[in-house]
Image (spheres, rainbow, N blue to C red):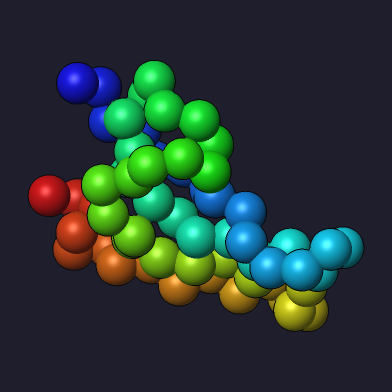
Amino acid sequence: MAVRLRLTRTGRHKRPFYRVVAADSRMPRDGRFLEVLGTYDPLKNPAVTELKEERILD
């Protein structure tokens, strides 16, 4: 199983909010994932990114 880091889109219409997740490369963008590794909010100025770095590096 090839695992990739992806952004899954959540939030409202025209108000995106993303989760950084570890997912199987064959799954769809917003499909099943293994673990949530952080968040990304592009609407804040500057954009806010929060990551669980210790889990990403494992």
Placement of 41 over or under 7, stated as above or below: below
Give the quarter of the image for residue 37.
bottom left
For residue 51, side relative to residue 13 (left or right):
left
Q: Position of residue 41 (x, y in %)?
A: 65, 70
Q: Residue at x 46, y 40 (%)?
A: 31
Q: Residue at x 54, y 50 (%)?
A: 8
Q: Residue at x 19, y 50 (%)?
A: 57
In the foreground, 58 or 17: 17
> How many discs mark residues in the rendered view?
0
Q: Position of residue 30 (x, y in %)?
A: 53, 43
Residue reaching furthest to the bottom: 45
Give the quarter of the image for residue 52.
bottom left
In the foreground, 52 or 33: 33
For residue 29, side relative to residue 56 (left or right):
right
Give the quarter of the image for residue 26.
top left
User: Can residue 28 be seen here?
Assistant: yes
For residue 52, side relative to residue 7 (left or right):
left
Q: Position of residue 1 (x, y in %)?
A: 19, 21
Placement of 17 over or under 58, stated as above or below: below
For residue 29, side relative to residue 36 (left or right):
right
